[in-house]
């Protein structure tokens, strides 16, 4: 029996396909270093102790019935204060919408802003915009970004298409690259969007909105600074919908507390949309997050700790790839800036393995790394790029520091076998 055309046409996750190969090898007793997952090993990166305590307390207080449709007022007020203090963004509790993580919020933005057959513009590589566009029955304008720009889009990349689209979906720090917008580039993009909206206002057209996913904004390293459109171009407030939450900065991916904020008329429609889906964050976790975000010292201590641990792993991997490159192997990495990802290149297509097999495709390269180097990483085509892109995402959220030297020993041995 067939399902709907929508269901039949939905593509499966490439990451899940890679996981299938990894799990098959693990079942045979192989040790695989799985750096594919954009998540944390909770034994290495547990959620903050104070947040855990608040969650238990909320359940003990029987905070187990339906939450408010737009999120508990206490959490929305707490998020409002947190944004004001840490980002200088002034949004009232009524401009904030709580949901079960960031995913329902991104989907709600698509559903709220776009009519069927409207067009969304997004750069690649990027996470899941292709799926949201498909599920919302929209058209896509896809901009493939360049390594020399650290895979971040520029205003000149977007400008040729801007008059033909209804939503631009951006993310910084970016999943899958762990790179960020510079102040100048994001300001140029914001001014471009604002100029286009002035044109549309004159011609009585529907506005162009910007979805700005900043779920990783608190995980920046070194001299990297996170910027957002509204701080750089205040008039962008009318057109920017932010997506944010606790999932990444507090290693709380399974706690499922996310928030969106932006123009009140958009947020209220998103609330109505999600109220019919029931994509609420659990009430106990909302109450706990509200209490935790007000604990300034524990929050800053945790962020300092997790950033230090993630950065140490990212730098170790980055140095390892630089060492391999200096030895003449066809690999490269982009210096880490943020999030839990390292962008790495394996220029191995066309090379021959020890048993005479030619690596004809990026899929072949991915499989070779898993089988011979015992390293699982995600090719950028899983994030919407062309299938011949030889760049990959390496995630360190599950990496043990003591394993990194072993990983590079195995990787070097595998690369030596190629001709």
Image (cartoon, rainbow, N blue to C red):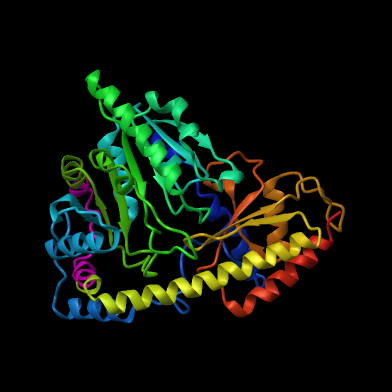
Residue 402 in view: yes
Residue 295: where, in percent of width, then height? Answer: 24, 76
Residue 411: where, in percent of width, then height? Answer: 73, 66
389 versus 308 height, above or below:
above
Q: Which residues are magenta?
A: 273-290
Q: Main secondary structure of the magenta part?
A: helix
Q: Quadrant of residue 301?
A: bottom left
Give yes or no for residue 284 being in the magenta stretch.
yes
Instruction: Identify which residue is drawn at 45% across, 71% down.
Output: 307
Viewer-closest of 246 and 155: 155
Q: Quadrant of residue 49?
A: bottom left
Quadrant of the drawing holding the N terminus: top left
Residue at the extreme top of the image, as rendered: 203
Give yes or no for residue 243 being in the magenta stretch.
no
Residue 398 in view: no
Instruction: Identify which residue is drawn at 31% across, 42% down.
Output: 233
The number of discs equals 0
285 sits left or right of 317 in the view = left
Residue 146: where, in percent of width, then height? Answer: 58, 41
Q: Quadrant of residue 135?
A: top left
Instruction: Identify which residue is drawn at 49% across, 40% down.
Output: 153
412 sits left or right of 340 in the view = right
Residue 3: where, in percent of width, then height? Answer: 40, 38
Viewer-closest of 342 and 384: 342
239 versus 306 height, above or below:
above
19 versus 234 height, above or below:
below
């Amino acid at each position: 029996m067939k399902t709907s055309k929508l269901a039949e046409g939905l593509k499966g996750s490439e990451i899940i396909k890679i996981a299938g190969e990894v799990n098959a090898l693990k079942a045979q007793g192989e040790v695989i270093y799985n750096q594919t997952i954009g998540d944390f090993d909770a034994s290495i990166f547990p959620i903050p102790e104070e947040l855990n305590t608040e969650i238990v307390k909320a359940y003990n207080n029987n905070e187990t019935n339906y939450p408010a449709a737009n999120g508990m007022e206490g959490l929305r007020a707490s998020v409002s204060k947190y944004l004001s203090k840490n980002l200088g963004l002034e949004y009232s509790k009524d401009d904030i919408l709580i949901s079960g993580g960031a995913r329902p919020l991104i989907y709600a933005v698509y559903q709220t802003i776009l009519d069927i057959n409207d067009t969304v513009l997004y750069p690649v590589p990027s996470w899941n915009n292709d799926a949201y566009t498909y599920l919302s029955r929209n058209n896509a304008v896809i901009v493939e970004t360049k390594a020399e720009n650290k895979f971040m889009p520029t205003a000149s990349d977007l400008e040729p298409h801007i008059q033909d689209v209804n939503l631009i979906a951006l993310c910084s720090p970016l999943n899958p690259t762990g790179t960020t917008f510079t102040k100048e580039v994001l300001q140029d993009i914001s001014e471009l969007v604002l100029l286009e909206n002035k044109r549309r206002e004159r011609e009585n057209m529907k506005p162009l909105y910007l979805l700005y996913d900043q779920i990783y904004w608190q995980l920046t390293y070194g001299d990297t600074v996170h910027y957002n459109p509204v701080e750089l171009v205040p008039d962008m407030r009318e057109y920017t919908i932010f997506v944010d939450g606790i999932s990444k900065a507090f290693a709380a991916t399974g706690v499922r507390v996310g928030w969106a904020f932006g123009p009140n008329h958009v947020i209220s429609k998103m609330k109505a949309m999600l109220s019919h889906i029931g994509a609420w964050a659990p009430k106990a976790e909302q109450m706990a997050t509200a209490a935790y975000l007000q604990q300034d010292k524990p929050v800053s201590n945790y962020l300092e700790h997790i950033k230090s641990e993630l950065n140490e792993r990212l730098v170790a991997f980055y140095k390892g790839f630089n060492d391999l490159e200096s030895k003449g192997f066809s690999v490269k990495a982009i210096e880490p800036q943020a999030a839990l990802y390292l962008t790495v290149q394996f220029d191995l297509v066309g090379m021959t393995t020890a048993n005479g097999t030619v690596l004809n495709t990026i899929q072949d390269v991915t499989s070779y790394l898993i089988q011979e180097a015992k390293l699982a990483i995600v090719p950028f085509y899983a994030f919407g790029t062309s299938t011949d892109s030889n760049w990959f995402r390496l995630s360190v959220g599950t990496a043990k520091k003591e394993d990194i030297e072993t990983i590079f020993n195995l990787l070097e041995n595998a690369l030596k076998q190629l001709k």
